[in-house]
C-alpha cells in the first residue's frame, strides 16, 4: 500500500500538521489506539464515520455493532471506501483496512462478525470522525 498513489496526498509534514499526534500514529504510522479509549466506541446516533485524514465516508452508523473488543466495529463499509492488504506485523497475519482515498490505516477486518456479512471491521475510533445525520 505504501507505493500506491492515492487521490488525497500530503507530505509527512502536512499530515503531522493536519492530524493530532494520536491520529497521525494510527493513520500514518499503522498504530492502534488502546481498547476502550475512544468515545466513538459508544456513539449510537444516526450518521456516518468518516476518515479523520481526508473526510471520506467509511461506515454508516447503521452498520455499527458492539463487538465487546473495545474498538468500534462494523459489519460492512460504504462501497469503494476501503482497501485491504495483508498485515504480517506482530507475528500475526491479518487483513488490514485502509481508506481508499488517502491510504490511512483504519484497523483490521476479521471473519467473526454478525450476519449478514460475517465480518467484523475493527476500526480505530481515532482514525474516524463521526458526522451525525
Image (cartoon, rainbow, N blue to C red):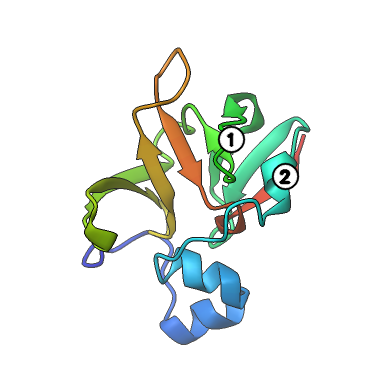
Relative depth, front residue between 73 and 49 = 73
- Mark 2 vs mark 1, foreground winner is 1
At which x and y percent is residue 29? Answer: 41, 71
Circle 2 Cα neighbour tier, 10 Å, few/some/many (<14 / 14–19 / ≥20): some
Looking at the image, tell me whether mark 2 or mark 1 is earlier in sequence order. 1
What residue is drawn where x is 28% and y is 61%? 90
Above or below 53: residue 75:
above
* Residue 32 numbered mark, or none: none
Circle 1 Cα neighbour tier, 10 Å, few/some/many (<14 / 14–19 / ≥20): few
Relative depth, front residue between 92 and 77 = 92
* Residue 68 numbered mark, or none: 1
Q: Secondary structure at mark 1?
A: loop
Q: Quadrant of the N terminus?
A: bottom left
Mark 2–mark 1 Cα distance, whole angstroms, equals 23 Å
Q: Which residue corresponds to mark 2?
A: 131
Number of labels in the image equals: 2
Relative depth, front residue between 54 and 92 = 92
Above or below 52: residue 41:
above
Q: Judge left or right: residue 27 versus residue 61.
A: left
At which x and y percent is residue 74? Answer: 53, 32
Quadrant position of residue 80? top left
What residue is drawn where x is 48% and y is 42%? 122
What residue is drawn where x is 54% and y is 59%? 54
**Residue that protrudes farthest toward the bottom in the picture:** 13
At which x and y percent is residue 76? Answer: 46, 28
What residue is drawn where x is 44% and y is 13%? 116
Q: Judge left or right: residue 82 versus residue 64.
A: left
At which x and y percent is residue 82? Answer: 39, 43
Amino acid at each position: 500500500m505504501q507505493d500506491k498513489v492515492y487521490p488525497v496526498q500530503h507530505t509527512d509534514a502536512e499530515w503531522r500538521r493536519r492530524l493530532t499526534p494520536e491520529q497521525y500514529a494510527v493513520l500514518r504510522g499503522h498504530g492502534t489506539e488502546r481498547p476502550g479509549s475512544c468515545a466513538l466506541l459508544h456513539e449510537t446516533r444516526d450518521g456516518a464515520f468518516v476518515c479523520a485524514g481526508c473526510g471520506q465516508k467509511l461506515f454508516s452508523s447503521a452498520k455499527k455493532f458492539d463487538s465487546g473488543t473495545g474498538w468500534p466495529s462494523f459489519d460492512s463499509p460504504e462501497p469503494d471506501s476501503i482497501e485491504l492488504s495483508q498485515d504480517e506485523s506482530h507475528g500475526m497475519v491479518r487483513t488490514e483496512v485502509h481508506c481508499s482515498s488517502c491510504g490511512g490505516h483504519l484497523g483490521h477486518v476479521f471473519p467473526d462478525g454478525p450476519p449478514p456479512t460475517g465480518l467484523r471491521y475493527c476500526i480505530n475510533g481515532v482514525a474516524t470522525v463521526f458526522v451525525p445525520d
